[in-house]
Image (cartoon, rainbow, N blue to C red):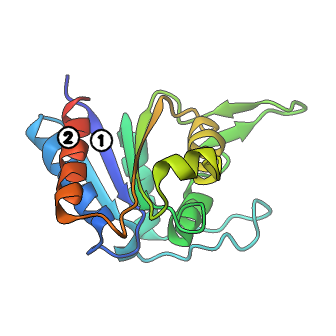
Amino acid sequence: MPRKITVILGHPDSDSFCAALANAYCEAAQMAGHELRYHALGSLHFDPVLHKGYKGIQALEPDLETVKDSIVWADHLVFVYPIWWGAMPALLKGFIDRVFLPGFAFRYRKNSPLWDRLLAGRSAHLLVTMDTPPWYFRWVYKMPGHHQMKKTILEFSGIKPVKILSLGPVRTASPVQRKKWLEKTRALARSL
């Protein structure tokens, strides 16, 4: 059954290995008959700083409105980004701060510690590169960036299941290894 997929490249460089992964995912998903929208955050024009937190309304720039519409349209989200200093790049975090707002991603209930997950009904894939070996990131660092994105952002907003493909170490990967990762990414897109 065809899916509506929004792919978000969270690496600021659209000539990165993350971009190659995003392109491989898009190509395979389209060949499998899925509808697709693609956004490279490094090409968008927006202020990544939520200047007053939730105290005031900061109007979204047109590029953010476009991606927001793509999130609403989609039933599956794909985020492609590297782990830098244990978590996502600042550009991706700034995007989330600006777009995943109360009233869009979640809504706190009045006089309750509970909240409504407004993006329920969607699933997600995280394609994450790192220079740390994935086993080390998991067992020694305890995967802080994965937990942040999966648990405290996407699942908090109702998006699940969230599946993560960790690829690394990229810095020392051979061309053969990178080719295998690109094929694994294509297989993931085809398996939806």
| Pointer 2 residue | 35
- The front one of 42 and 178 is 178
Which quadrant would the N terminus be assigned to in this image?
A: top left
Q: Secondary structure at mark 1?
A: strand
Quarter-wise, where is residue 17 in the image? bottom left
Q: Position of residue 114 (x, y in %)?
A: 79, 30
Amino acid beneath label 2: Glu
Q: Residue at x 44, y 32 (%)?
A: 122
Q: Position of residue 121 (x, y in %)?
A: 46, 27
Q: Looking at the image, which residue sits at the far left?
A: 31
The answer to whether residue 174 is left or right of residue 109 is left
Kindly check if marks 2 and 1 are in contact, taking CB atoms under 8 A apart as contact. Answer: yes
Q: Which residue is mark 1?
A: 5
Q: Which quarter of the image is occupied by the C terminus?
A: top left
Q: Is residue 161 left or right of residue 109?
A: left
**Displayed quadrant of residue 11:** bottom left
Residue at 87% x, 30% y: name it. 112
Rendered image: mark on residue 13: none
Q: Report x, y in % for residue 126.
A: 42, 46
In the figure, 139 relative to 115: above or below? below
Assess disc 2: are there few (<14), some (14-19) or many (≥20) residues with their C-alpha within 10 Å of its C-alpha: some
Q: In this view, which residue lies farthest toward the top?
A: 1
Q: Earlier in the sequence, mark 2 or mark 1?
A: 1
